[in-house]
Amino acid sequence: MNANAVPVWLSAGVVPLVNVAVAFLAAGLVVALIGESPLEALGIMLRGALGSQYGLGYTLYYATSFIFTGLAVAVAFHAGHFNIGGEGQALMGGLGAALVALGLPFLPWPVLLPLCVLGAIGAGALWVFIPAYLQAYRGSHVVITTIMFNFLAGTLLVYLLVGPLKMTGSMAPETAKFVPAATLPLMSQMAAWAGLTITRTPVNLSFVFAMLAALSVWVLIWRTRLGYAIRTVGANPDAAVYAGISPRRITVIALLISGGLAGLMATNEILGVQGRLINEFTAGAGFVGIAVALMGRGHPFGIVLAALLFGVLYQGGAELAFDKPRITREMIIVIQGFVILFAGALEMMFADKLASLYTRIAGRAAAA
Amino acid sequence: MNPAIQMTGIDKRFGAVHANRAVDLSVEQGSMHGLIGENGAGKSTLMSILYGFYHADAGTIAINGRPSLIRTPADAIHSGIGMVHQHFMLVETFTVVENVMLGAEGGAFTARGASAVRAKLQALSYAYGMDVNPDAVVSDLAVGELQRVEILKALVKGANILILDEPTAVLTPTEVEKLFVLLRRLASEGKTVIIVTHKLKEIMAVTDRVSVMRRGEMVGTLETKDTNPADLAELMVGRRVVLTIEKFPAHPGAVVLEVKDLAVRDARGTLRLDHVSFQVRAGEIVGIAGVSGNGQSELLETIAGIRRPESGSVALNGELLDCGGRDDPKALRAKGLRHVPEDRHRMGLVKPFDAAESAILGCSDEPAFGMGPFLSRDAVLAECAVRMQSFDVRPPDPTLRTALFSGGNQQKLVLAREIERDPKLLLVGQPTRGVDIGAIEFIHKRLIALRDAGKAILLVSTELDEVMALSDRVLVMCGGRITGERRPEDAGEQDMGLLMAGVTSDAPKAAA
């Protein structure tokens, strides 16, 4: 009954840690079943992800995408909506960035690069506008419509990449390379400008964008009037109507922001790493964002931490698959699945038990 | 003879909250027993333990002298205990027989169970004079009938002990009288009846004995004939309480609110407000009496700009309003209209927010709370601290989650937010629902003070006593129409009851 009195450190700190620990236990069991040592596997994973500049770089590169898509899910979630169309919005973000980069190659980089980033945000937001409008004014559930729009985005991109946007003479479904003024510098390049040498990895300037985005989302949600309206609509739409806040308007605005954040994911992959628009570049980051947002409990700080965890899983998992042929690429997906299962879908499985354990102990302490 | 119920040393904790502290309760067989106490005094916890919803940490229960281990409601039903909840637990689309049969279907095919239930229902209705059509669909029944179905449901399951939780909350005075006649009859036939309520008048009218709880403890069990409302209130609160409201005659000024021919339909197209007209003047409280669900909510929400009327007009200080259109709640606030909604949980507050954030609901765009698009956390907290002090909200902690405040303190938070913004017109719905006696006194005083400061107040309450005590004029609503206007000093209880049931002297045709 009284889960109310549970302190923040328990619900936001201990509960996610327990969930992750259980996920690793379950994954370890599977590793043991196929005859490998779970501890050794964990060691390889952690070392592979965090033990070298190379591993760390890749971990941060993966985490960058997850931060953007995680923030996208969280903003919609604060308004009470479940935007699972991050995948499609990110794809369109890539298209938006590419159209600017390919269409205005003559502009100098201080103009072109911001325009490309804005293109990514705008296209992501535009892609969620129809689902948002339908949700707000026609009651079509945004979960259904955004997932439909994922497929639409995928097919639209394939059509464009094998047709109008395909580089002439290329066999691959991809656009021509962008001009250098339209690409984001790698961290290794930026370190070189500062006179430092670090290993060349895909992590690029958009990691900084991701951190700024996390900070901005925090300010937006907890320190602005709009954020207050978004949270009111999400927590109690009737109270919002009473207050004169239009749930419809706020739904559209929150989802547009969400779509823009998902679109920003393209800055990492398209503007940062590929330098051209390729097919299926999101590689499931839009869906990982859902798990990241759930695990991070909708808070930007938690989302950054959860995104880093998933970055470790992706990079460490790749190393593990390389080191232990018996642990295949598919096994790594199983392990990631466990984390999503326990930290996302079964997020509340241990929460109640931990809360009642806590209240019992606290009650005893108060009685003593 | 053994008591029907003997609860001894019942102790229950919810985390840090000690809901029942070594509570003893003894109820004699064939008696009407009242259980009163403020919100959070532990009455519901005690009854939930008796009915098997919760398990006590310590203590024993004996039913008719036999120690009983009640772990689930099924155990309670088996021991002959029946409960009628405040919010009826009926399936709207089922008939009376189907509802009563729930949990006793008697196998995969329902025909045999249904005929057994039907026979029992008829016998019981006959024995106790309850006329309920067993084949009526529940959604077609009036509230009083629904309650009878709930009582029948318990009796069919063999209940000898009936617990009624706030049974009169949704009834008209006439229906209350009918219910009491029925309950007395049940008691005289040997059934034991426990009434959980906060209405002292009803306790005095109907019970044989009354037990009073305060802060988880049983503070006393009295013979009803040896006590009086003032003493009971003092036992409940722990200090002397002023039950009567002191106020001087109103000095109504100019017309502030003028409602003309207002008609409102709900989403299903049902006419909820049927061409309602009235005025509220500065410096007076106009009360709307009536059983809940007769258009009062729609009236408040329409004037507040939440609903759009079908026809008719609303004018504030002579200016025609476009309620629900251009004049949404935000625009109306700017024009000096403030609204304390009927249901603070549904509308008045955002329960997961901290108190400070709930305290700016509807005011979050005020420049005082930050620069441009930003909200200043410090300004919001400071504002809340001031409000909490002037309305004596406890605990005075603006960072505490709204849901963790008691009902009375939540309501004070809403009232502080709306009253202290210098309204020209205040709409107040159910100002003291779920609020403890001490806070009721405070809230009533504040409303009278606001009236005396020359503000216009439109009050909706389903507590007839409250409307009569606070208002300078009382309008009675039934079926979306105003069935009469009375001055509280010369309105009789029976007269009001008839108006609330839709019986008007000038128009004898009763509303459905």
Image (cartoon, rainbow, N blue to C red):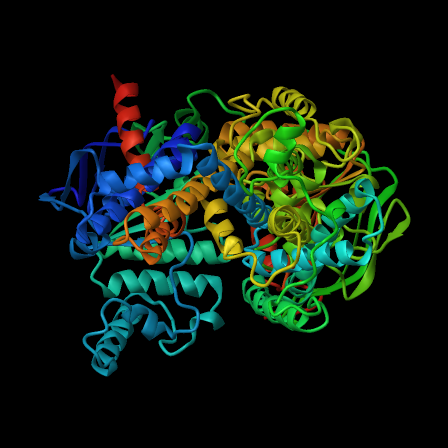
Q: In the image, residue A343 lies at what x, y percent?
A: 38, 45
Q: Is residue B89 left or right of residue B279?
A: left
Report the residue that reaches farthest toward the front.
A169
Residue B87 visible: yes
Quarter holding the N terminus of chain B is top left
Front position in the image: A354 or A259: A259
Q: In the image, residue A85 lies at what x, y percent?
A: 57, 59
- Quadrant of the rendered structure where residue B478 is? bottom right
Residue B481 visible: no
- Quadrant of the rendered structure where residue A110 is? top right
B44 above or below B122?
A: above
Q: How many marks?
A: 0
A133 above or below B238?
A: below
- Quadrant of the rendered structure where residue B16 is? top left
Q: Is residue B88 left or right of residue B335?
A: left
Measuring 73% from the left and 30% from the top, which residue is drawn there?
Answer: B450
Quarter holding the C terminus of chain B is bottom right
Measuring 70% from the left and 60% from the top, which residue is drawn there?
Answer: A176
B509 above or below B505?
A: below
Q: In the image, residue A45 lies at what x, y percent?
A: 34, 40
Measuring 51% from the left and 32% from the top, which residue is drawn there?
Answer: B401
Front position in the image: A109 or A134: A109
Report the residue that reaches farthest toward the right.
B318
Q: Is residue A266 left or right of residue A106?
A: left
Report the residue that reaches farthest toward the top.
A368
Q: Is residue A22 left or right of residue B335?
A: left
Q: In the image, residue B489 lies at what x, y percent?
A: 66, 41
